[in-house]
Amino acid sequence: MSKLPDSWTACLLGDVVSYGVTQKVEPGDIPEDAWVLELEDIEKGTSKILQKVTFAERQSKSTKNYFAAGDVLYGKLRPYLNKIVRADSEGYCTTEIVPLSPSQWLDGRYLFYWLKHPKFLEYVTSVSHGLNMPRLGTEAGRVAPFVLAPFNEQKRIADKLDSLLARVNVCREHLDRVPAILKRFRQAVLAMATSGKLTEVWRKGKQPKHSWKEVRLVSIRKVISCCNYEQNTRFCT
């Protein structure tokens, strides 16, 4: 890492948040209308919440972690998937998600962006244990690297990232629509070509000898078969 500004501090994640300290809640104590978040509800890499499901809809039977609005929710199972979100309301999540509460001197958005930083991702990928379902252990999470900037600077960094990434997301949405637009364009061009509209202006100027007409595909096949027969006969003789 390059040299940090004088007012910045290189420290550990456990120095700024209580990583791994969670409030466990049993299913019988969760309200029916409460938000219950599972890892499958989070899109990998983008931090997009794909769906919000209530306890009544999900009917979970396992212990959950409680989280408050503003908490950063870190998916410790298969951390290379980068499933991290900021909670916009309180709720309950799988114990494979670790709620992290920012303090008065730590901006929640700054914490969120650091957990998505390539350096942090590289670290958690290297220390995760388990072959098929690797996860970040509590102690490994506490000693993960963290760079702490002054609070006002944290807010400015987070504001700038919010603005830039919002524009990136808009561009991505536009690009995601391009394949569908191209598909519709190809279909329209093919439709125009096979209906004669594509060469309509050309025909008016050229006055072709033979006009277009609709025929059955089977009749074309017969003509082609006859032509092939004649060519093969000439070749053999």
Image (cartoon, grey):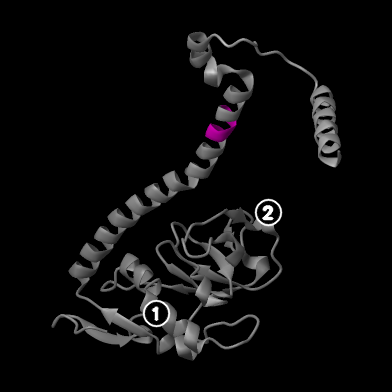
Q: Measured from the top left, where is residue 25 in percent x and y?
A: 60, 72
Q: Judging from the image, what secondary structure is the residue with disc 2 in?
A: helix
- Magenta range is 184-188
Q: Is residue 143 left or right of residue 58?
A: left
Front residue of 71 and 206:
206
Is residue 187 found inside the magenta-colored segment of the image? yes
Classify residue 191 by image quadrant.
top right
Residue assigned mark 1: 120
Residue assigned mark 2: 57
Q: Residue at x 19, y 82 (%)?
A: 4
Q: What secondary structure is the stretch in magenta mostly built from?
A: helix
Which quadrant would the C terminus be assigned to in this image? top right
User: Does 54 appear above or below 140?
Assistant: above
User: Does 170 appear above or below 20?
Assistant: above
Q: Residue at x 59, y 24 (%)?
A: 193
Q: Is residue 101 left or right of residue 110?
A: right
Q: Measured from the top left, where is residue 29 in percent x and y?
A: 63, 66
Distance between the Cα atoms at labels 1 and 2? 35 Å
Residue at the farthest front position: 237
Front residue of 139 and 69:
139
Classify residue 184 by image quadrant.
top right
Is residue 169 found inside the magenta-colored segment of the image? no
The amino acid type, in three-letter code, at marker 2 is Glu
The amino acid type, in three-letter code, at marker 1 is Phe
Which quadrant would the N terminus be assigned to in this image? bottom left
Q: Measured from the top left, where is residue 160 in percent x and y?
A: 25, 59
Earlier residue among tags 1 and 2 = 2
Q: Is residue 20 visible?
A: no
Q: Is there CB contact under 8 Å for labels 1 and 2?
A: no
- Label 1: few (<14), some or many (≥20) within 10 Å? some
